[in-house]
Amino acid sequence: MLYVSVHIPKTAGTSFAKALGQAFEEDELVLDYRHARDHAELAARGVGALETHRAWLSPGWLDLARRYRQDINALPKGCKLVHGHFPVRKYHPLMTWRKPFYITWVRDPFARAVSNYFYWQSFDPEHMPDPLVRTVLSDRWSLEDFLFHPALQNYQSLFLRGVPWQRIDFIGVVERFPEDLKKLSAMIGRPLEQFMENTGPVSGAVETHEHLRAHFMEFHEEDTALYHYAVDRSKRAQN
């Protein structure tokens, strides 16, 4: 069994990683944050800046094997859990020959996207290796540009593309973090302590821009469906 924890940006993944670090031994846990390398490789192959994230999260099987075989082979023998930013299919059983237990957290799509925008605003474009983030910053995208750009449409669900939601063993909901963390702890038989790390850089930003929510949820229809699915599933599990 290999626990595969997909950290979708701005879904309490840093807090969750700290809980995992307390629950797993150092040689059992691998943190996989090689996304900057992946984005640079795609850009070097001629993928446009606005397409790098979609290309990263939607690889074909041959591209998946070519891109990640070395990472898979480098996993320590004692590794029991991988956590980080990567497409869920990176650790598919066809790649690892191990049965995966998929874990991820999702968040209200509008709140997640607003938080993501202001988080990216904290970076310096001149020292940003990610082509898409650098473009957002250099071209001075407004929040509305960011929320409604096709390059970022259904960004949350892109991380899970290729694996049916029903096949994800645990989908936690950030707004139900304490309850869902307790449930996951019971499922994997490990104590998971609640931490609060990497909170959003702009307080009240979601409430300030609430008038954009309805249009956003329509534009990101798949992310909206994923979030409702996760909330319903979480609530059913509590009953």
Image (cartoon, rainbow, N blue to C red):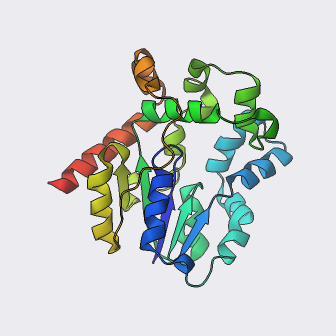
Image coords of residue 42 (percent x, y)? 78, 48
Judge whether residue 225 can be spotted in this image. Answer: yes
Q: Is residue 238 above or below residue 26?
A: above
Residue 238 found in image quarter: bottom left
Q: Residue furthest left?
A: 239
Tell me the quadrant of the picture where the C terminus can be found: bottom left
Q: Nearer the viewer, residue 234 or 209?
A: 209
Q: Nearer the viewer, residue 48 or 5?
A: 5
Image coords of residue 89 (percent x, y)? 56, 60
Image coords of residue 31 (percent x, y)? 59, 65
Residue 140 found in image quarter: top right
Q: Taking 82 as reference, is 19 left or right?
A: left
Judge whether residue 45 can be spotted in this image. Answer: no
Which residue is pictured at 72% across the width and 51% down the height?
Answer: 36
Tell me the quadrant of the picture where the N terminus can be found: bottom left
Q: Nearer the viewer, residue 204 or 238?
A: 204
Q: Taking 139 as reference, is 117 left or right?
A: left
Residue 82 found in image quarter: bottom right
Which residue is pictured at 44% across the width and 37% down the height?
Answer: 223
Q: Is residue 69 above or below residue 204?
A: below
Which residue is pictured at 43% across the width and 63% down the height?
Answer: 19
Image coords of residue 52 (percent x, y)? 71, 42
Q: How many numbered markers are drawn?
A: 0
Q: Is residue 52 above or below residue 239?
A: above
Q: Is residue 203 above or below residue 10?
A: above
